[in-house]
Amino acid sequence: MRNLKLLKSLRSSELQGPGSPQCFAVRADTGSLLVASHYSITEYDPRTGQVVTEASLTAEGFLPEDGSGVVVGLQDLAELESACLATAGGDVVLFNLNTCQLECFGSVDSGLTSMSWSPDEELVVLTTGQETIIMMTKDFEPITEVGIHQDDFGEGKFITVGWGKKETQFHGSEGKQAAQRKVQVSVQLQENHIWDDRRPRVTWRGDGQLFAVSAICLQTGARKVRVWNREGVLQATSEPINGLEQALCWKPSGSLIASTQRHPNKHSVVFMEKNGLLHGDFTLPFSKDQSKVKDLLWNSDSTILAVWLEDIHLKCLHAVSAVQLWMVGNYHWYLKQSLDFGRDSQKAPACVCWDPERPLRLHVMTRSWTSITYDWGYTTERSPGLDAADNANVAVIDGDKILVTTFRQCVVPPPMCSFELQLASPVNQVTFLCQPQRTNQLAALTSDGQISVYSQGGLYNVSLKLLEGILVKIVFLCFRSETEVDGVVVSMVHCSQTGTVALQLEDGQIRKLLWDCPKPSVEDWRDSSGCSINFPVPCVQTALCSISGEECLLGLTDRSHLYAGDTELASNISSFAVCNDFLLITTHSHTCRCLQLSMLSVKGLQAALASDGGQNDETLRRVERGSRIVTVVPQDTRVILQMPRGNLETVHHRALLLAQLRKWLDSLRFRDAFECMRKLRINLNFIYDHNPKIFLENIETVITQLNSINHINLFLTELKEEDTTSSMYPRPESSPVQIQPVPGQKKVDVVCDALRSTMESMDPNRFFLPILTAHVKKTVPELEIALQKVHELRVNPPEAPGAVSAEEALKYLLFLVNVNDLYDHSLGTYDFDLVLMVAEKSQKDPKEYLPFLNMLKSLEPNYQRYTIDKHLKRYRKALHHLSKCGEEHFLEALQLVKEQKLYSEALRLYTTDSPHYKALSCAYAQHLVEQQQAEQAGLLLWRCREPAGALQAFASSSSWRNAICVAQQIPLPPDQLALLARDLDCEEAILALITGAVWEEALRLVSKSIFLFFYCYSFIVDIFIFLNVKNEDCPDCPDAELYSEASSVMTGSKYSHSNSRISSRSSKNRRKAERKKLSLKEGSPMEDRALMYALGEIITTVDKMREEVHNLLKALVLFQFDKQAEKLQLAYEEALQTMEAAVPEVWPEGLQNSQAPVNTIQPNFNTHTYIYASAEVLAPPKMRNGVKWKLTVVT
């Protein structure tokens, strides 16, 4: 839904010469124009109005001096810094642009009718007067010469197997002979019109692999198009097309070949594929005999097709010339611009071409040598309103019609629209009024210079005389004065909120128009510090906005760079729009960003646009490739995007949506927020999570605004404990974090209770179903309460109109809860009427539940409840009811306690002096012994006067104090008491010996008792597992700190000398003081000595473990831990070997004789070893290799 906007036009009339221009080309490197006329070739710079180079074609004899010569082709050759031209006389001339020399590279006797170079400038195709094609290289070496008219179709001839043809059909009684009959189909082709120049036309595909030639067929007199490849081999011939005209242009993207066709009742532009078949068309807006098409021209990016026309009226002496610019969208061709040049033949275009580097720049050279350069830009004309009165209008130009779509009311896919505005002439520009409450009014500028203003009340025209098609954006300001601007204004933007008008000049400079004053003036655009601000490069789209409270002008270049003044925000922007406080952009990485300008600075915008966004980043949304913003509906959440093929898509951007929801919730518009969230699938928890305090304080307002039982139920059923403002919809950084108003309680329970209590106070009959929902939705569902309320409703049905019946309530409850769960909970109420009511509404078979219910009714009440609770697996309640059933059911209760391990609950139900309590205690003690908790079991038995069992339990748990006390209480005979004490002491002794690694003495004591043997065995296993884990994780020895200190690297520390005096009274104190000096901190004076000392201590300590490891290996082998013993022996051996190999590296030979610091880097070490000569650490530690510690049986 984009239009073309004229940014600027450059008109230059300084170039004058004899004759008139015939051919026209643009130099891509310099931007100057190459013009060939009847007499000369000229290089002209329209920006300076100066002739760069010029050479006469008549003086060299390439053209006749009488001006009757014709130049049939002109091409700029950038690589050769020359221009190539061909004359109708047959000469191919190269014009050197540096030396201004002309050189003829060849001549064709029959003359030339056209010349066309390939896009890569490697090949040139010439058509001759003898109807032949000559293909040459860029060095003018001939490749091939073939005739234009070929009888063969070409290499791409269609192959058919006859499907659907008469030859393959069944003919019945006519026989097979009917299939052999040929039907002659003839197409009557009319000769081309009288004004066809009958010259061949040549056009190349954008990749230079194919070219097409349109020529008059010698037999029919009609034009035919043939497609050739790069080697000069015919590929395809077009189908017979009646009325095909001379214009021919291949779309640079390579898909279609454009030409024109004259029908009996219309004139149209047709498209052909490379196989010669027609593929679409569109009708030109005039009758078949009104105009002729001189040429068709695609721009370099294939987005605009220029149609060069000349109106022909037999009664008029002069023709009206025009150039129309067409664009396609959603398979519809729109006439976007119409350039009328009037009836003056001298002002009519002589040459028209697109710029090879700037796709939206058009060059025109008139017959009077006036050059005009048009610079266009894409624009989407949308209404600028910011309130709900704005209809979000978008106007699309389509010839003499304006297609207006009101996106607030509906989304109409183009080329359809909400309504059309019909004008008398083609429209070139349209804009909307920038005044609040009147932004739905628009004005249109037509090609004849008329401005038409449309409003809801009607239409009126304003006649303005404009400068030769030069137009800037129309802004509805009061026409009360005029102000001169020093420069060419290419865009103007007006902010209706602040009244600011910003102008952009052609070089990117920004000016501010002070129009709301007695004498309007123009001044530089400045920031808050007073510095002048300008765009680094011109921008094709601009918009005013406020960033962190400072008004700023945004600009988007044709190279996708977005600027805020002179600061580049991003370089991959395809479109943008400003709506209220939000900036919306689409990027070439197929995302749509929505950023709140009041919360960001310019640097913040840069950072936000450069980031990829997080998982729940509400500012980022993925969109379809090539999407562009059409408009944003003000005071709404809708963003209208257009896809590359032209169709529309409406998205509700998360940032706009959440901002709108927050605004509604803060203003207590809960219904609007709820409806929006329900439609757009936003989690309804956000209504509460946004501001819990406001929600709870306005519960009645929430219920009143929702005003729907279904809506309240929907809100309740979606409640979750999750805080959506922390996970799904994070709060803006500037917003305060909301504190839960009821600390310590769960969110779902708080909301359910608050809503339920409010609804019960307002109208319990009307809100009966939401009340049930509030009970069911709680963290622990209150199903029994809900069922009880349904039962009460059945017993006492309300008489209020519109009240819910018990059957409806129960049916709704069954919808919320699983029927089996609801049946079980109804059974748990012990109310058989309620159970039957639920069972009747369920799918249960009466043969299944009626016998069970009848059986329950026949039982004693307490035993009945016990049976129900046991059936529902509510064992604690079942035990409580069973304890009331008397002595005859105690064994059943005891069995239930043992099965469900309800010992603690059972002991609370009986008195301590009852036999039931004693039986339960004994059972509990037996359970504790099985759980390896004998000491607690002994306490229970001791408490319930079972000293024998308590003594056994204390003895097994080695609780010797309790055991001695119980033994004296029994009392035990003295000999048995002494034996008990000796056994307990022996176990403690063995434990101490094992802990101290005195294995032989421990084995001597163990050998006295097989019981102690197994006890010691299990303890050794535990000790070994403990040592194994400790050795894997960290060294479990007194030197662990030394290991850690020696292996760590300290950074950033400083060392300071101590001035304290050290006593030297004894050698022990001296050694202690010396060790204090050995600090491993980085940068300390004795760091190197400390490192050597620490390594020596480690080696000495590990070497002293040989005997201990030997004893441990023997114990492991004795208790059949062979694998563990082998693992330990290998690990210790590897440690000894590593240390022995490192000793000569840490303490090299000859170190004692050296007094200088030595810096060595050993190959097997990762750190530098700094060694200072010191008598205390120069001697390496001695390892006791003579000690035999390994076991042969382990090896």
Image: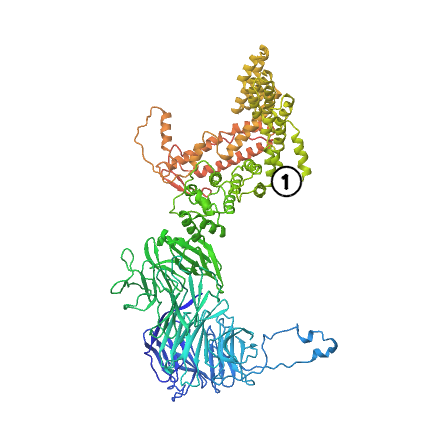
Using the rendered image of the protein, determine whether residue 570 is visible from the camera's viewpoint: no
- Tell me the crowding category of disc 1: few under 14, some 14 to 19, or many 20 or more residues within 10 angstroms, Cα based: few
Q: Quadrant of residue 636?
A: bottom left
Callout 1: helix, strand or loop?
helix
Q: Residue at x 50, y 29 (%)?
A: 1105
Residue 260 showing in the rendered view: yes
Residue 280 x, y percent position in the rendering: 53, 72
Q: Give how far across and how far down residue 1194 sits, in percent.
A: 59, 32
Looking at the image, which residue is at 50% across and 45% down? 712
Q: Amino acid at mark 1?
A: Glu
On the image, which quarter does residue 85 sit in? bottom left
Q: Nearer the viewer, residue 670 or 208?
A: 670
Q: Check the image and name the residue furthest to the left.
A: 518
Percent of width and height locating residue 1070: 36, 27
Residue position for label 1: 840
Q: Give how far across and how far down residue 696 sits, in percent.
A: 43, 41
Taking the image as shown, residue 925 lies to the left or right of residue 363, namely right
In front of the other: 289 or 538: 289
Q: Is residue 1140 above or below residue 1008?
A: below
Report whether 1182 appears left or right of 188. left
Q: Nearer the viewer, residue 374 or 112?
A: 374
State the quadrant of the C terminus. Answer: top right
Q: Is residue 293 above or below residue 444?
A: below
Foreground residue among 362 and 840: 840
